[in-house]
Image (spheres, helix red, strand yellow):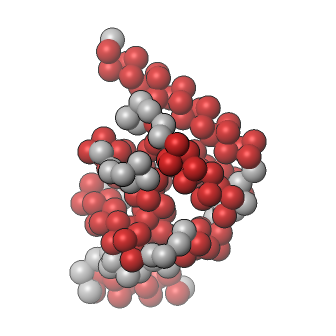
Amino acid sequence: MLEGLKDFFAALTGGGPGPHDADDLRVAAAALLFHVAEADGSASALEIETLRAVLAEEYGLDGEAARRIEAAGEAADAEAVDLYRFTSVLMRHLGEAERVRFVELLWRVVFVDGAVHELEDNTVWRIAELLGVSTRDRMRGKHDAMHGAVERAGSIEA
């Protein structure tokens, strides 16, 4: 019922969460995805495009809503002093399997440009630890994302 009221008031005030609404699961997820995309010093256009696609797919958002959530996540990430602010939101809202899935999504953003920078790898490791995702599941997600990136690159070339 509380979620319904939040949605109702959000619709009355013009839509989705603002840049300070890091308690929204989608904004927290976007902030972490953006943090990973930017871990190597800059978020490429391909990483941002993938981040938006992940948000749209996982949360059933249209393109404009995904852009708003991505922008709110970017702003929240810029204001944050640590990752716990966002991982604690995910811990409250997601079960174990969903947290493992989220780490796989982080890897998807990392691998989209064909390379893994050591800072991206380290950032995913830190987020996975805060989410209680095991090393085994984190590495399985990395492996799967790497193979998915290779398959997507192969289908583009074909």
**In front: 8, or 74?**
74
**Percent x, y for residue 45?**
26, 45
Q: Is residue 27 above or below residue 154?
A: below
* Front in this rendered view, residue 53 or 120: 120
- Give the position of the C terminus as an image quadrant: top left
Residue at image coords 33%, 77%: 19
- Above or below residue 13? Residue 83 is above
The residue located at (30%, 66%) in the rendering is 71
Furthest residue to the top?
Answer: 158
Residue 93 percent location from the top left of the image: 61, 70
Q: Note whether residue 37 is visible.
A: no
Which residue is found at the position 47% from the left and 82% from the top? 4
| Image coordinates for residue 136, horizontal then vertical, percent | 75, 42
Residue 140 position within the rendered picture, expressed as x and y whole percent measured from the top left: 68, 37
Residue 63 shown left or right of residue 89 in the figure: left
Q: Quadrant of the rendered structure where residue 155 is?
A: top left
Examine the image and state in which quarter residue 143 appears: top right
For the N terminus, the image quarter is: bottom right
Q: Which of the 4 quarters of the picture holds residue 69? A: bottom left
Query: Residue at 27% across / 55% down in the picture?
Result: 63
